[in-house]
Amino acid sequence: DIVMTQSPLSLPVTPGEPASISCRSSQSLFHTRGYYHLDWYLQKPGQSPQLLIFSTSYRASGVPDRFSGSGSGTDFTLNITRVEAEDVGLYYCMQGLQTPITFGQGTRLEIK
Amino acid sequence: QVQLQQSGPGVVKPSLTLSLTCAISGDSVSTSRAAWNWIRQSPSRGLEWLGRTYYMTEWRSDYAVSLKGRITIMADTSKNQVSLQLNSVTLEDAAVYYCTRWSHSGHYFDIWARGTLVTVSS
């Protein structure tokens, strides 16, 4: 199984400040179709997870442009340029390259 | 707009079978564009993919190896729904269970149900 490791696990951020979450996979997530199979999901309090970023760097429909994803190989990053109160929740990276699909442990973003 | 509506008991006795259904609206369970998955979430395990079923010239299913032998995910085309059965449950199976849609073209989970909290208790 591909193991996904996130850091930090807790991320207190002042509104308006940037935030960054790292995700590392135990093997390359390169897909033969030419992209890295890494997605990011956000689970807001009391809600189901929702797609944020797919294929490393593509924002899902309706996701503000303050969110961006980058990375390659086994190292990936989610960046938020200016954190807002509504960004609070659990952020998960996920690999969909092979089954079993696996998730990182989750990073809890909270507002200072 | 695609929606997934889960139903099933919130409490299951140890050693018995957990059964949940996921009714699909706005899409067909038989679509070749998606797979129907079950994922669970618990404090100890985080998000854990359990398995999926999808139609691609025939019905196919994949399961997490850790659950093989205990889990069955099936489609019911007459009701346009997907079901999850997990046999011989233990306390470790207590979790929030989610039905989700996997987009074959986008390669991501684009639709999630609200989830069902399942407690294992005698």
Image (cartoon, coloured by chain):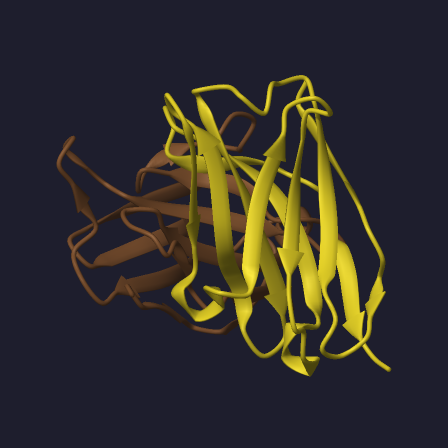
Chain colours: A brown, B yellow
Q: Residue at x 39, y 45 (%)?
A: A39
Residue A8 in picture, x, y percent from top left? 43, 73
Q: Residue at x 71, y 39 (%)?
A: B22
Q: Residue at x 40, y 50 (%)?
A: A79
Count numbered badges in the picture: 0
Residue B89 in picture, x, y percent from top left? 67, 73
> Residue B75, relative to residue A108: is it above or below?
above
**Residue A65 visible:** no
**Residue B111 visible:** yes
Quarter that holds the N terminus of chain A: bottom left
Quarter that holds the C terminus of chain A: bottom right
Task: Pick the residue in front: A75 or B70.
Answer: B70
Q: Quadrant of residue A21?
A: bottom left
Q: Quadrant of residue B46?
A: bottom right
Q: Is residue A93 left or right of residue A87?
A: left
Residue A49 in picture, x, y percent from top left? 60, 48
Residue A12 in picture, x, y percent from top left? 57, 70
> Residue A105, relative to residue B104: is it above or below?
below
Task: Pick the residue in front: B114 or B120.
Answer: B120
Q: Is residue B48 left or right of residue B81?
A: left
